């Protein structure tokens, strides 16, 4: 009988895979994420024409005025916190799926359980996501305010001193709306897509390509659907003085003001770069899981899972 892998080793591999996938994904897609934030932070109430006309103009302007490194402004805090964020998201979803499969006595879980597993993963990750996104957004927008030399560390310290732990969790409600909804859409898409397109006769390479495709489509679809929440999150979490002159008392107020002042279409600002970021980010994450990077590194046979 095959040796059964211990719970510790199984979780160790999943955490490592999630963290590794997060670092690789962020490094590859961060410039598009920065463009997305710059596009979403623009609002008509600032007066005058928008600084960035479209995605391509935004990318070109940043590259020209801030150089190649400007496209990675704020990447440090993301690389630091993406490890626990991605690990929590992927591990919780995986363990909940495993639990539902065991309790139901079936190898394939129902759509209801797919959604519940996704919701659980999204709910847990916001502990890391909220402060990470808050600090990342300020760093991404810092160059738009003359003389702003604040670092992520000094900003975190300032917010904590002024408002306590709540200062680092500004925008938690809308972050939860975005991340839980995303996970409720994404993980079922991947689960159902895997059941439909994967076969036991697939070669390792064919399975890898199918995983890339399913995760990319699921990631893009989920990202597009939750873009309005992401726009509102960006507006609420923008605390850098001089970037915007509108204040929001909460999620309903932010939705109301954005639609009233800028129209319904403003809720989908940055949709294309966001989908372009999330599709490969999630494809990389799922592929790392499929390949079993940690399992290969630690010499663990996945057949024993």
Image (spheres, rainbow, N blue to C red):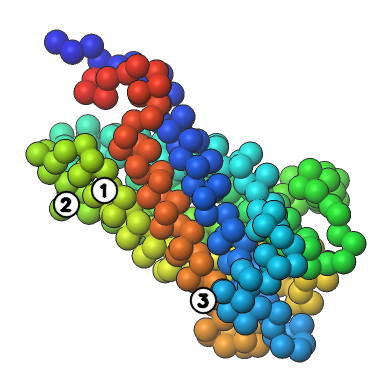
Q: Is residue 232 left or right of residue 74?
A: left
Please rate how many residues cluster around mark 2, counting C-alpha atoms within 10 Å: few if below 14, some from 14 to 19, many from 20. Answer: few
**Which one is in front in this view, the residue at disc 1 or the one at disc 2?**
1
Disc 2 on helix, strand or loop? helix
Q: Which residue is mark 2?
A: 197
Q: Position of residue 220 (x, y in %)?
A: 39, 63
The foreground one among 140 and 236 is 140
The foreground one among 142 and 156 is 142
Dot 3 or dot 2: first in sequence order is 2
Q: Position of residue 139 (x, y in %)?
A: 73, 55
Residue placed farthest to the right in the image? 147
Q: Which residue is mark 3?
A: 268
Give the image quarter of residue 54.
bottom right
Do callouts 3 and 1 mark residues in contact (Cβ within 8 Å)?
no
Disc 3 on helix, strand or loop? helix
Q: Which residue is mark 1?
A: 209
Q: Position of residue 256 (x, y in %)?
A: 61, 81
């Amino acid at each position: 009988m095959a040796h059964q892998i211990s719970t510790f080793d199984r979780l160790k591999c999943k955490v490592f895979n999630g963290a590794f996938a997060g670092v690789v994904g962020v490094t590859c897609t961060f410039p598009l994420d920065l463009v997305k934030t710059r596009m979403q932070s623009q609002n008509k109430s600032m007066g005058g024409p928008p600084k960035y006309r479209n995605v391509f103009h935004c990318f070109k302007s940043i590259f020209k005025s801030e150089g190649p490194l400007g496209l990675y402004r704020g990447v440090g805090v993301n690389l630091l916190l993406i490890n626990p964020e991605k690990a929590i998201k992927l591990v919780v979803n995986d363990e909940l799926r495993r639990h539902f499969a065991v309790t139901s006595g079936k190898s394939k879980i129902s759509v209801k359980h797919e959604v519940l597993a996704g919701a659980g993963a999204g709910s847990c990750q916001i502990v890391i996501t909220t402060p990470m996104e808050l600090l990342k957004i300020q760093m991404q927008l810092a160059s738009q305010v003359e003389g702003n030399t604040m670092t992520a560390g000094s900003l975190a310290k300032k917010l904590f001193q002024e408002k306590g732990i709540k200062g680092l969790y500004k925008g938690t409600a809308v972050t939860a709306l975005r991340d839980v909804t995303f996970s409720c859409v994404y993980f079922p898409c991947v689960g159902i897509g895997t059941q439909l397109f994967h076969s036991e006769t697939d070669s390792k390479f064919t399975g890898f390509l199918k995983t890339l495709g399913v995760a990319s489509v699921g990631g893009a679809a989920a990202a597009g659907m939750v873009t309005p929440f992401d726009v509102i999150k960006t507006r609420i979490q923008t605390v850098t003085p001089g970037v915007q002159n509108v204040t929001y008392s909460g999620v309903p107020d932010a939705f109301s003001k954005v639609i009233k002042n800028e129209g319904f279409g403003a809720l989908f600002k940055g949709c294309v770069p966001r989908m372009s970021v999330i599709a490969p980010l999630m494809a990389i994450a799922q592929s790392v899981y499929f390949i079993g990077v940690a399992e290969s590194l630690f010499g663990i046979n996945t057949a024993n899972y």
